[in-house]
Image (cartoon, rainbow, N blue to C red):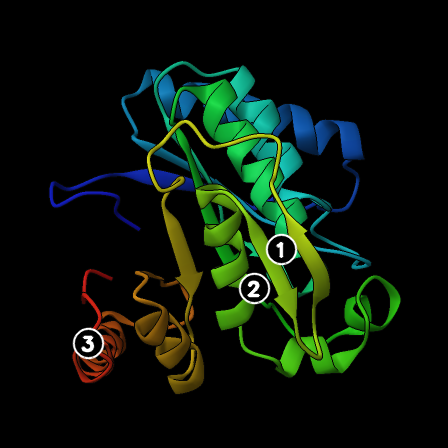
């Protein structure tokens, strides 16, 4: 996960609760790891979002990112990921703009859809949201950051509105898409956005994924900077 051409180093804070540990223990450890990582010179802190499971208890990546931004001074803090289909894109745009303002431009919005589990039936609007690609939601987020936004579609329908808060960073904070399959790589490439690649693939597989992203981005006339 890099934010520039120069090498960046970071840590993923997964908020996993092992047997015998309380929720408070997990979040205290998360803060300790974050502050120590910054003290050691790491560039990036990444936080996750999970719902209704037994292990990972970070139920809001954006809220946890806000907490860590308030306890750090230099590190970039990104969501890896905000489960975009579970949230209205205008609400995500507002929250991301707020973090961008409060942190002085140290926040990153990483989005993905996670797994097609119970959370989509309980918190979301059903498995259809999981299957739907992120293109429209991402377009709405960027439109919200630019000013007036409206939508009329099967997924989203609302009149033209102007979000109260604009991001500090011109054009909004950086946005990344989690990619782990050809379909999600195509989502990132067609949106002109870089990818987040996780630990479930080896280096050789990731080289192939990056090459596919570059090809698909070129085919779509988009920059291949992921």
**Left or right relative to 153: residue 5:** left
**Left or right relative to 27: residue 47:** left
SS at mark 3 in the image: loop
Q: Residues within 10 Å of mark 2 (few under 14, many from 20)?
A: many
**Alpha-carbon span between mark 2 and mark 3:** 20 Å
Which residue is drawn at the image coordinates 18% and 65% (left, top)? 223
- x and y percent of residue 119 in the render? 79, 66
> Considering the image in quadrants, where does the C terminus appear?
bottom left
Asked if residue 124 is positioned above or below residue 128 in the image, the reply reads above
**Alpha-carbon span between mark 1 and mark 3:** 25 Å
Which residue is drawn at the image coordinates 83% and 61% (left, top)? 123
Asked if residue 203 is positioned above or below residue 36 in the image, the reply reads below
- CB contact under 8 Å: marks 1 and 2: yes
Q: Residue 89's mark?
A: 1
What residue does disc 2 label? 137
What residue does disc 3 label? 221
**Alpha-carbon span between mark 1 and mark 2:** 5 Å
Between discs 1 and 3, the one toward the N terminus: 1
Asked if residue 189 is positioned above or below residue 177 in the image, the reply reads below
Q: How crowded is mark 1: few (under 14 residues within 10 Å), some or many (20 or more)?
A: many
Between discs 2 and 3, the one toward the N terminus: 2
- x and y percent of residue 80 in the render? 50, 51
In the figure, residue 93 lies in which quadrant?
A: top right
Considering every residue shown, the one lying at the far front of the view is 160
SS at mark 1 in the image: helix
């Amino acid at each position: 996960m890099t934010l520039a051409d120069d090498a960046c180093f970071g840590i993923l804070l997964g908020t996993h609760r092992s047997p015998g540990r309380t929720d408070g223990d997990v979040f205290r450890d998360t803060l300790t790891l974050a502050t120590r990582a910054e003290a050691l010179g790491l560039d990036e802190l990444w936080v996750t979002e999970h719902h209704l499971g037994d292990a990972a208890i970070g139920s809001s990546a954006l809220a946890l990112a806000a907490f860590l931004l308030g306890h750090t001074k230099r590190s970039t803090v990104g969501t890896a990921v905000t489960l975009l289909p579970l949230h209205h894109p205008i609400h995500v745009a507002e929250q991301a703009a707020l973090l961008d303002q409060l942190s002085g431009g140290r926040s990153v919005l990483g989005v993905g859809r996670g797994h097609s589990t119970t959370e989509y039936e309980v918190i979301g609007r059903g498995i259809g949201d999981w299957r739907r690609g992120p293109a429209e939601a991402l377009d709405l987020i960027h439109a919200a950051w630019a000013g007036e936004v409206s939508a009329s579609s099967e997924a989203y329908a609302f009149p033209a509105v102007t979000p109260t808060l604009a991001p500090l960073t011109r054009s909004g904070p950086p946005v990344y898409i989690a990619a782990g399959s050809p379909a999600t790589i195509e989502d990132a490439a067609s949106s002109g956005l870089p990818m987040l690649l996780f630990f479930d693939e080896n280096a050789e597989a990731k080289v192939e994924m990056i090459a596919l992203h570059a090809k698909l981005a070129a085919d779509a006339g988009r920059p291949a900077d992921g």
